[in-house]
Image: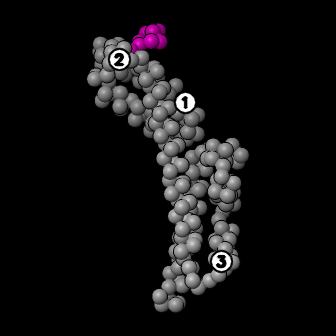
Amino acid sequence: MGGDENCTIRWLKENYSEHFERLYKMMYKRLYLFARNFLMDEELADDIVQEVFVGLWTKGKMMKLDIPLERYLFTSVRNLCIDHHRKLNIVDRYQRHLLETEAFVIFPYEEGESERELRMKRVFAELPDMQRQVLVLSVVEGLKYREVAERLKISEGTVHTHIKRAYKYIKEHLLSLLLFVLLVFKW
């Protein structure tokens, strides 16, 4: 690949093992930095770059000869990063739906709307400050993870972690409250 920026699969196939290793050494750091800047998560960036290289290793011998390697690698990394963000958004929407559903199902008849709201507010107030802030910005204000991350000056991965932990805490506390009610009233 010596100096030629437009190396293709044809070059890779000339001496697959040796050229693959040269390509990996030459491109890994650039691809890693690209993924890290996209995801704001070092481990995930490394995982994605490794996944792209594993895919190239397994599929490279069967690919068209004229595919430019650099463009292929950057496009593959970008696509996996985008897929990761899509998955986070799907998980977040699902968790929001579960949380909203549980909040209204736990005390369907015994308590009025205001009592249910008070219990939700109490559990919400017990959340650590950063989890509460992230949840308010994401769920209440409807900001995207990227926007929440920018506003709080944290990474998108950290935003996802705080939301996941907040949902877990709320779910556990609402379920423990439900179990208490079930035991007391012997439903």
Image coordinates for residue 149, horizontal then vertical, percent: 65, 45
Task: Measure the C-alpha gap from mark 2 to mark 1.
Answer: 23 Å
Magenta part of the chain: 1-8
Do the residues bearing badges 2 and 3 touch, measured as CB atoms within 8 Å?
Answer: no
In this image, 109 relative to 9: left or right?
right
Please name the predominant secondary structure of the magenta segment in the image.
loop
Number of marks: 3
Which residue shows up at 45% across the image and 33% down it? 49
**Residue under numbered circle 2:** 9
- 29 over 162 or under it: above or below: above
Task: Measure the C-alpha gap from mark 2 to mark 3.
Answer: 64 Å
Image coordinates for residue 86, horizontal then vertical, percent: 51, 44
Which residue shows up at 54% across the image and 55% down it? 93
Task: Measure the C-alpha gap from mark 3 to mark 1.
Answer: 50 Å
| Residue density around tag 1, few if under 14, some if 14–19, many if 20 or more, within 10 Å | some
Callout 3: helix, strand or loop? Answer: helix
**Is 55 colored magenta in this rendering?**
no
Tag 3: amino acid:
Glu
**Residue under numbered circle 3:** 113
Foreground disc of the pair 2, 3: 3
The single residue placed furthest to the top in the displayed view is 3
Tag 2: amino acid:
Ile
Q: Is residue 106 visible?
A: yes
